[in-house]
Image: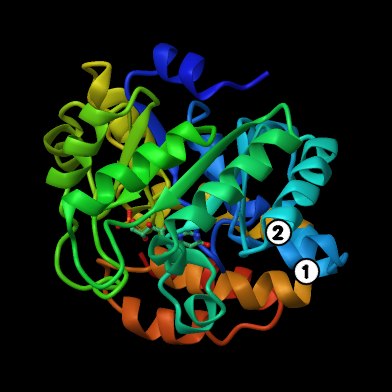
Amino acid sequence: MFRWKDFSAKHKPMILLAPMEGYTDSAYRQLVKSVEPSVVCYTEFTSSDGLKYGSRRSFQKIDFKEDERPLIAQIFGKNPEHFGECAKMLEEMGVDGIDINMGCPSGKVINSCHGSALFKFPKLACDIVEATAKATKLDVSVKMRLGFSHLDINDLLPFTKGLENSGCKHLAIHGRTTKQKYTGLADFEPIYIIKEHLTIPVSGNGDIKSFADAQDKLKNLDGLMIGRATYGNPWVMKEIVEGFKGNTYNGPKTFLEKLPTIYNQLRLAVDFKGERVGILEMRKHLANYIKDFPGASKYRFELVRVNTEQEAVNILEEIKKSL
Ligand SMILES: Cc1cc2nc3c(=O)[nH]c(=O)nc-3n(C[C@H](O)[C@H](O)[C@H](O)COP(=O)(O)O)c2cc1C
């Protein structure tokens, strides 16, 4: 059974794929794992109420293949009982861990007192962790930010200790407050201080784009979580994992070198979501690979408008011929 403590003892540091709604579905996770198998994957955040009431879309977010393991299912909500029920369901579905979202800054989520709004209600946050941990044998973790409207280490320390005492087995912390959303730079200094005060593994998250960034940010942490830097560049995960082993990994640099991976992602997306939805979702991913060669912007313009797999293949082949 997956245990954060054991996993972090074996993987120094742990490298985690950040949960990203609209991106890290099963196809994306399989792609990243095909490049770097040691990565821990999180699902996109999934409503605990949606799971409880049997929403098909919520279940699709959890759907996974064996090679995505260890797979952590991330859920959000505010009702501790629902979290407990979902934990049992998720355990039956075979995921390796359950993560509670306490970091989402989106208006819709925080207005319902979900996501990072829980920072304002420490007792409820702890009750949710406790109810989830009591309902399952799986490890329960939390992903959070540095605070709601402002950063105050005197609030963060008791908040995170409370989560640990309630049964949280791993914390991933994005170095921004809710108010900051994605502006400014992620601040890792408070994360290092939190790590000093806890016994569970702690991972830092925010703005890591390369091995150099990862090496610079790791300090006393157990893991690093990487999100946006994987867009059009799943190889960054291998670059980071190999870098920490003392190796240099140079991933594909040219379009032609990247093409087999682009085709793999296209296939995975269509297999997972069907052609219509798979291609709509692939538009942004395709565009992310198309840069640094003559005519790239014209091809990006075309790729974000494709409706079928064949249209995408035709444009990719046209690019190949033009280079
Ligand atoms: C498009 C998008 C969707 C996201 N969805 C989630 C989510 O579902 N759950 C979550 O905890 N964080 C979510 N995040 C936040 C990321 O997990 C991560 O904390 C943030 O992007 C900072 O890391 P990065 O600089 O490596 O991208 C999302 C971020 C983006 C850009």
Q: Is residue 146 above or below residue 261?
A: below
Local crowd size for mark 2, using a 10 Å CA cut-off: few (<14), some (14–19), many (≥20): many
Q: Indicate the quadrant containing the C terminus: top left, top right, bottom left or bottom right.
A: bottom left
Q: CA distance from mark 2 to mark 1?
A: 6 Å
Q: How many marks?
A: 2
Q: Report the residue marked by disc 1.
A: 57
Q: Is residue 123 above or below residue 288?
A: above
* Image location (x, y in percent) of residue 150: 20, 68
Q: Indicate the quadrant containing the N terminus: top left, top right, bottom left or bottom right.
A: top right
Kindly tell me whether mark 1's CB lies below 8 Å from ligand 1: no
Q: Report the residue marked by disc 2.
A: 61
The structure residue drawn at horizontal position 16% and vertical position 42%, both measured from the top left corner, is 213
Q: Is residue 49 left or right of residue 24?
A: right
Badge 2 marks a residue whose secondary structure is helix
Quarter-wise, where is residue 296 in the image?
bottom left
The three-letter code of the residue at mark 1 reads: Arg
Specify whether residue 253 is in view: yes
Q: Are marks 2 and 1 in contact (CB under 8 Å)?
A: yes
Badge 1 marks a residue whose secondary structure is helix
* Image location (x, y in percent) of residue 63: 77, 50
The structure residue drawn at horizontal position 83% and vertical position 45%, both measured from the top left corner, is 89
